[in-house]
Image: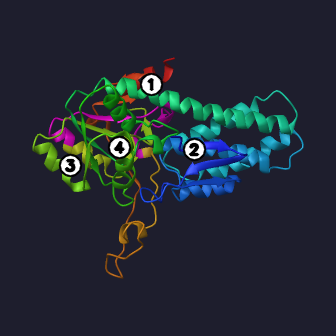
Amino acid sequence: MRTVFWQDNQLCMIDQRLLPETFTVVSYRSHLEVARAITDMVVRGAPAIGAAAAFGLALAGFESRAQTAGELFSDLQSAAITLKAARPTAVNLAWAVERILQSAARFPGSSADEMRAFVLSEAQQLADEDVEVNKRMAAHGAELIADGDTIVHHCNTGALATVDWGTALGVIRMAWEQGKKIHVLVDETRPRLQGARLTAWELEQYGIPYEIISDNMSGYFMRAGKVQKVLFGADRITANGDVANKIGTYMLALAANDNGIPAYSVAPTSTIDLSLAHGGLIPIEERNPAEVLDIQLAGERVTPRNAKARNPAFDVTPHRLITGIVTENGVAYPPFEQSLRKMMNAK
């Protein structure tokens, strides 16, 4: 199942806002439409929005009326600004856009049409690489999962959050396919319910046993000795190992640490941002308060009419609470300043 793919000169994506009730693939012909889809969370998950943005640049190339490669590159730079602004916290988005731009800057020809085809091929290569990277991560991470483990999983980090396979949920899927008898506690992940809606849906596709719990139940099950591992993804990892991820990750890691339960972040090296020394420097997106005040998707108000809300989409988990960071090149352990650089430099 590919979440993001190119077909008939269009970018096609699963509309994740409609799951699990409705499975719908929507198509886009302009980079502005793609940027809006990223902001509106038609597509979400750091690797997935990176791939979507890469294809968005390809669409910008086809939209452009440029006659030369130089003129086209200028238009791509303008489109890149719009795409990178769609969601600021996930570094994969900016990484993917910059990778495509840098490739285009090295394009040896002068033909705009040839550059358009080149940019599309680069975007397709990026998407294909994401799948292979995720499989490698899954293999490394599955080594950490024991037969009989119960795992608390936060948000959605599966195929829906990437091009295919996933990050943390990909580890769970790989462990299951290896024959390990595991059980997953899926926290709802308020306010957009990515766990209850998306992760539960994916686990059903794979036949992996799970139960949904509310976000405030994980500590109870940890204290009761019912949890052996905690897994989550990442939207940005700084040089010291601080992890920005879906809101609620910090509290989950605190509970795991207090109960001596290993907590692993699973993310590709494209999520590691060595330019930032620590998590306090990561921009945190704040979304519409209506996501908190209303019932998700139903649009029904469940709070007093005059109530106000805050809605940060991410939080930062300090590196001291993280047991290890699983990448496609292996597992990084503290001290992360050294191990993350090693992962970034590995082939």
Residue assigned mark 3:
218
The residues tagged by marks 1 and 3 sit, at their Cα atoms, a distance apart of: 28 Å
* Residue 327 appearing in the image: no
User: Do tag 4 and tag 1 residues touch (Cβ < 8 Å)?
Assistant: no
Q: Amino acid at mark 2?
A: Val
The residues tagged by marks 3 and 4 sit, at their Cα atoms, a distance apart of 19 Å
Work out whether residue 36 or residue 11 is closer to the camera in this orientation and state it: 11
- The foreground one among 282 and 24 is 24
Whether residue 228 is visible: yes
SS label for mark 4: helix
CB atoms at circles 1 and 3 under 8 Å apart? no
Image depth: mark 1 or mark 3 in front:
1
104 vs 131, left or right, is right
**CB atoms of marks 3 and 2 within 8 Å:** no
Residue 335 at x, y = what percent?
32, 25
Q: Of all residues shown, which one is farthest toward the top?
A: 347
Q: Position of residue 292 (x, y in %)?
A: 37, 67
* Residue under the point 36% across and 69% down: 295
Q: Which numbered disc, 2 or 4, marks the residue that appears first in the sequence?
A: 2
- Using a 10 Å C-alpha cutoff, classify the residue at mark 3 as few (fewer than 14 neighbours), some (14 to 19) or many (20 or more): many
**Residue 4 shows which numbered tag?**
2
- In the image, the segment drawn in magenta is 256-280
Provide the residue designation for mark 1.
136
Q: Please, what secondary structure does the residue beneath circle 2 have?
A: strand
The residue indicated by pointer 4 is 203
Secondary structure beneath dot 1 equals helix
Lower position in the chain sequence, tag 1 or tag 2:
2
Q: CA distance from mark 4 to mark 1?
A: 20 Å
Left/right placement of residue 30 relative to residue 151 reads: right
Q: Is residue 279 magenta?
A: yes
Q: Residues at badges 3 and 4 in contact (C-beta under 8 Å)?
A: no
Residue 325 vertical position relative to residue 63 in the rendered view, above or below? above
